[in-house]
Image (cartoon, grey):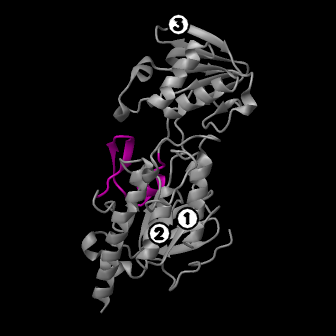
Amino acid sequence: MSTVQYPLSTNGVFDLVIIGAGPAGISAAFEAKKAGLDYVVIEKGLIGNTIYNYPVGLTVFSTVNELEFNDGDLKPAREKPTREELLSYYVRFVLENELDVRTEETVLEVRREENHPADEASAPLLRKEGSFRVVTDKGEYAARNVLFAIGAMDHPRRLNVPGEELPKGHSHFRETYPWVKKKALVVGGGNSAGEAALFLAQEGAETTLAIFREDWENTDPKQGCIKYWVKQPLEEELQENCLKLFFLGKVVEIREDAVVLESESGESIELENDVVFVLIGSDADLTMLRSLGVETDTGKYGEVPVYDPKTHETNVPGIYVAGHFTNKRHIKAAIEAPRKIIPAISASLRQVKSAAE
């Protein structure tokens, strides 16, 4: 690997390295620039990569004010923006504000420098030298603070059943057209599974939605139910026999030309099948955070880092989290989090300056 030391930092050490260029990362870059911080955003994919991986043509059913960085910035053609409109808005926001976002660069490691403080009391004196080294496939960055703002799309949950690695198996749904007149199975009980089943059924795939009965009957948004604007058209597709519903016990096996399911009553059923979409959620990858000594706990969405809700700083001084690394994962919360994080970082840097004088 060709290594470039401290790329394009004013003085060799960034005040903040932001990992991820989704809504949280873009918001953090915008706030950091306004605050005069020396920052950089590193994104292994594209700007708004999580949005890019939404299904083609998807209507994003969040309200506009939950998706935009500044009031009135996002102007969709209809009441709710499409995937394409939202993605275009995020890219345009980065370009128009000249935010330092470096795409297609993968973070390989984040490690503490030898002088990293063991506690918050001694942090200000040591942060002035750069407490962390961020190693990527294109270089290395020294940073006083690091914000993890990575989505979870690259870490989908798995069924762990035979045949899951076959080419016919997918953990993301992008578009319907390759599957017209094909036999499609969607496994999952949330919005992503519901939307995929709906799109497939509407565009001519022979679609079966395999779902736990309690998930289908769930109407509580706080418990991750399929939203009503997806559920209602799904029910219409069922009435028109364009969609089949299978109340799942478990998936037993995925085969080349079939899938074996067990019903909620324990009956084993083999369905002819061309493609399987396993859409059962995703989890943030905590590997790098654990290697830094960040403590974790079980939250609303599973295991998450322990962090101060007022600043989003973890137990490791200088390590911050947002988006899928928190207990609030919707886009509005991801955009708002940096408005707490950047003032906290600015305050710590003022302590550094004061201690040095």
Which amino acid is tagged 2?
Answer: Phe
Residue found at x 37% / y 33%: 221
Q: Nearer the viewer, mark 3 or mark 1?
A: 1
Q: Is residue 88 left or right of residue 64?
A: right
Q: Nearer the viewer, residue 65 or 268?
A: 65
First-in-chain label (3 vs 1): 1
Residue found at x 43% / y 80%: 36
Residues drawn in magenta: 284-308
Q: Nearer the viewer, mark 2 or mark 1?
A: 1
Q: Residues within 10 Å of mark 2 (few under 14, many from 20)?
A: many
Q: Residue furthest front?
A: 78
Circle 3 is placed at which residue position?
A: 267
Q: Is residue 324 visible?
A: yes
Q: Secondary structure at mark 1?
A: helix
Q: Is residue 49 visible?
A: no
Up-down: is 151 above or below 30?
above
Residue found at x 48% / y 31%: 229
First-in-chain label (2 vs 1): 2
Per the image, is 306 magenta?
yes
Q: Quadrant of the C terminus?
A: bottom left
Q: Which mark is residue 93?
A: 1
Up-down: is 210 above or below 330?
above
First-in-chain label (3 vs 2): 2
> Measured from the top left, where is residue 105 in percent x and y?
62, 63
Evaluate if marks 2 and 1 touch, with contact meaning CB atoms under 8 Å apart.
Answer: yes
Q: Is residue 152 left or right of residue 139?
A: left
**Residue 55 appears in which quarter of the rendering?**
top right
Q: Nearer the viewer, residue 219 or 22?
A: 219
**Residue 139 appears in which quarter of the rendering?**
bottom right
Q: Which mark is residue 30?
A: 2
Up-down: is 210 above or below 110?
above
> Measured from the top left, where is residue 286 in percent x and y?
45, 51
